[in-house]
Amino acid sequence: MFKHLFKKIKIYASLPELVTFWIFLIVAIVFIIVNLLNIPGSNYISIVLLSIVGASILAISLRLATTNLEIKLERNQMKSIIFNLQDGIIAYDTDFKILVFNRASENIFGMPAEAVIGKIFSLDYASKMKSKTLMQSMFPSLAATSVNRTEIGSNIQIVDISFDDSGLELRVTTTRVLDPGGRLLGFVKIINDRTRQIELLKSKSAFITVAAHQLRTPVNALSWTMETLKKESALSDEGKMFVDNGLKAANKLSKIVNDLLDVAKIEEGKFGYQFAEIDLVQFINEILSADSAAAEEYGVNLYLDQSGDEKIVIIADKEKLALAFNNVIDNAIKYNVKNGSVTVKISKLTDSPFIDISIADTGIGVSSENLEKLFTKFFRGENIVKIQTEGSGLGLYITKNIIKRHGGDMRVESELNRGTTFHFFLPTDPNLIPKKETILD
């Protein structure tokens, strides 16, 4: 207790505002000593000391006045900037007392600043408010549909909240405000209204869906025609070659159309997941068996490395999860080297309720500059394009969205010409699976 009090006194004693007091204290001590000792000329000494005190007070007062004026100007400028920002700004102290509520916040939540500034925003107070959007933005855990974009415990928390009744889509960023000594002073929330942005994304997805559906019919007809022609015994060898090429092209086009449809459904939050218990080891064995023909064609060996013989059961959508794994394993086979390998390893994490499924290949790898772009739409690495020019660049984007929807995450490590390892982290706790399908970035 005394140590804390001494530390606090030390901090305040060093503030520039107390310089006047310390000068006055020193001069007062000298003044008292001079008068007590009756030093000759003490009257002149007193005048000099008082002049020093007066000059010091004047100088410091002028400096403080100038500093205060600058602070007031900066504060007014900051208030003007915050007030006119397009994003909502809500600032509050450690007791949840609202200090700032700008114009954008008023528009987003439909409440005047006067109704909330100075109020202690407790859960009891929030429950009595008419604005459900403000209550859930302040306490995102109360929202029916929310997606965390950052890890719990990080200095900045980003949460996307969807309000089904109003169609409002908000991104709430919460950051802590600390003093120079690291002491927590309060919090600032930045409210980004993403409703228009999400509407545009849905409109684009709807357009892609319509276009892809329109393409699917002629592509299917083309594939059927090529399949029929391939069975014709009267075809010459050259004719069979043309039919095979046409069938391959139709299948590739069909894959691109299906990828576009999947992306559109994912971004609309309508991919449609059916969760059930699955035996993870058996599931991965089935995938590897299905991919064995392609691996043999490319001269690549497939391996499964399981830690222990324990049966591992998770909650997942078997069809969607198979699509995610196949996207990665297919790439690992295609972009590998002759007599290379693809190894799938299953490990239980001891410090968290997750399973780590790694897929390691001995292929061409990915440059460090391209690693962060791997999961973005339509991206394909330069070295991959040189080997195979065709491809939609949507597979890994779809894969990551599927894993995220399962409450998991993905990580990738790679080195050029040495291979790539993808890690799928899937939860063993069903409570970690999001309750509702949402639009993911």
Image (tube, rainbow, N blue to C red):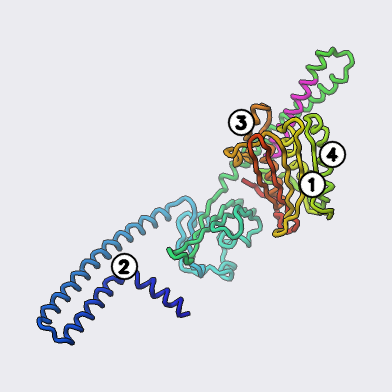
> Which amino acid, by three-letter code, is at mark 2?
Pro
Kindly identify the amino acid type of the residue bearing the numbered disc 1: Asp
Query: Which contiguous range is marked in magenta?
Result: 244-263
Q: Mark 4 and 3 residues: CB-CB less than 8 Å, in contact?
A: no
Mark 3 residue crowding within 10 angstroms, few (<14) / some (14–19) / many (20+): few
Q: Secondary structure at mark 4?
A: helix
Q: Earlier in the sequence, mark 2 or mark 3?
A: 2
Which label belongs to residue 382?
A: 3
Binning the other alpha carbons within 10 Å of mark 2 as few (below 14), some (14 to 19) or many (20 upward) gives: few
Give the residue number, with chain letter if any, for mark 1: 305
- Reply above or below: 46 against 405: below
Amino acid at the residue labelled 4: Ser
Between disc 1 and disc 4, the foreground one is 1
**Circle 2 sits in a helix, a strand or a loop, which is it?**
helix
Q: Main secondary structure of the magenta part?
A: helix
Q: Residue at x 82, y 17 (%)?
A: 240
Q: CA distance from mark 2 to mark 1?
A: 66 Å
Q: Secondary structure at mark 1?
A: strand
Which residue occupies 45% across, 80% down?
2
Q: Quadrant of residue 212?
A: top right
Chain-order first, disc 2 or disc 1: 2
Residue that mark 4 sits on:
289
Q: Is residue 214 above or below residue 29?
A: above
Q: Which residue is mark 2?
A: 16
C-alpha gap between disc 2 and disc 3: 59 Å
Task: Look at the image and say whether residue 248 sits in the magenta stretch.
Answer: yes
**Residue 82 appears in the picture as rendered:** yes
> Reading the chain from its start, which is encountered first: label 1 or label 4?
4
Measuring from the top left, give residue 242's x and y in whole percent: 78, 17
Magenta stretch containing residue 363, yes or no?
A: no
